Image (cartoon, helix red, strand yellow):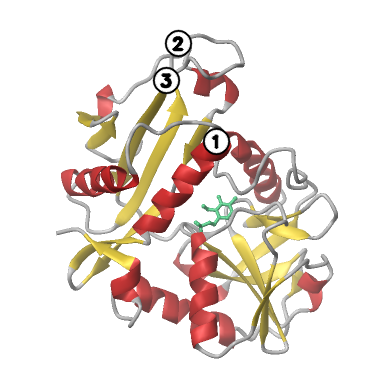
Amino acid sequence: MINTEKIWMNGKLVGHDDANIHILSHVVHYGSSVFEGIRIYKTENGPAIFRLREHVKRLFDSAKIYRMEIPYTIEKFEQAIIETVKANKLEQGYIRPIAYRGYFELGVTPTRCPVDVAIAAWAWGAYLGEEALNKGIRVQVSSWRRPALNTLPSLAKAGGNYLSSQLIRLEALNNGYEEGIALDYLGNVSEGSGENLFVVLNGKLITPNLASSALGGITKDTVIQLAKKLGYEVVEQAIPRELLYICDELFLTGTAAEVTPVYSVDNIVVGNGDKTITKALQKEFFDLAHGRHELSEKFLTYVK
Ligand code: PMP
């Protein structure tokens, strides 16, 4: 059960039990949705939504790729998100906005099905656990690749893409790991099932570029900005698999995972276990998210 009281659907707040869609909705059959995951952090000035504008912009971009017309402006959509957070009286948590092809007809062509929109929000803590944030997680390189370029667009955060994430995650969990890292169609490193990835090598940060079949992560962008501010060089480039085994530090970033160190890859311990740079960036990130950083004003939307 997801513990939430009010869900915003097509302009109205409805109760948890009434937030339903028809079984013959296009999205149920063809994965035709675009969505976001956004965190609400507790701060001294009340709950704050992390990088709201960037998340809503990415939702609209995902919709644009799939030729879906979201029937609201970005500003109206942001207001609806704030309204949903307030209606659920959340101090901290997670927000899930979604736009999807609804009920009309069931051919593959989606154009005559309405674009319906919903926003849910609920209380939520660390995704991979507090211990993961501290000690790091054990990951495997997945046997599943990310979709090749020009197949399923990875820069769209679309429902259907998460079939790939499920394969990666199920395999990793079945094999006793906490997460899987997928390669792209060329064999370069892409991303985790729901996280971007950074390698630390000789004091420099390296992360896969935009053509690596990974999502353009907002946490990734945040970490790049924080790292540069701390004086680290950051390069976005193709990463061969074996760099995961010989780098000094490795960490994952994502709305859910925040900044999570990786302890080992395929049971090979990363570096010598040192996490100095990862921990420094993790601290900056949490300071930022909790309103204690000079960039907090710019990145947080306080819910009054
Ligand atoms: N990759 C995938 C596949 C994801 O689902 C996510 C989570 N949205 C990310 C990367 C990280 O993106 P963000 O930092 O914007 O949450």
- Mark 1 and mark 3: Cα distance apart in space: 16 Å
- Mark 3 and mark 2: Cα distance apart in space: 7 Å
Residue mark closest to the camera, 1 vs 3: 3
Which quarter of the image is occupied by the N terminus? Answer: top left
**Label 1 close to label 2 by CB (< 8 Å):** no
**Label 3 close to label 2 by CB (< 8 Å):** yes
Residue 238 in percent (x, y) is at: 78, 66
Residue 283 in percent (x, y) is at: 43, 80
Crowding at dot 3, Cα within 10 Å, few <14 / some 14-19 / many 20+, comes out as many
**What residue is drawn where x is 66% and y is 54%?**
214
The foreground one among 218 and 249 is 218
In the displayed structure image, the side of residue 300 where residue 256 appears, left or right:
right
Residue 277: quarter of image: bottom right
- As drawn, the label of residue 104 is 2
Label 1 sits on a secondary structure element that is: helix
Q: Is residue 118 above or below residue 37?
A: above
Q: Is residue 214 above or below residue 203?
A: above
Q: Earlier in the sequence, mark 1 or mark 2?
A: 2
Residue 171 in percent (x, y) is at: 71, 45
The foreground one among 85 and 247 is 85
The three-letter amino acid code for the residue at tag 3 is Pro
- Mark 1 and mark 2: Cα distance apart in space: 19 Å
**What residue is drawn where x is 54% and y is 82%?**
227
In the displayed structure image, the side of residue 23 where residue 215 appears, left or right:
right
- As drawn, the label of residue 97 is none
Disc 1 CB within 8 Å of nearest ligand 1 atom: no
**What residue is drawn where x is 43% and y is 75%?**
285
Count of residue discs:
3
Q: Which residue is mark 1?
A: 159
- As drawn, the label of residue 114 is 3
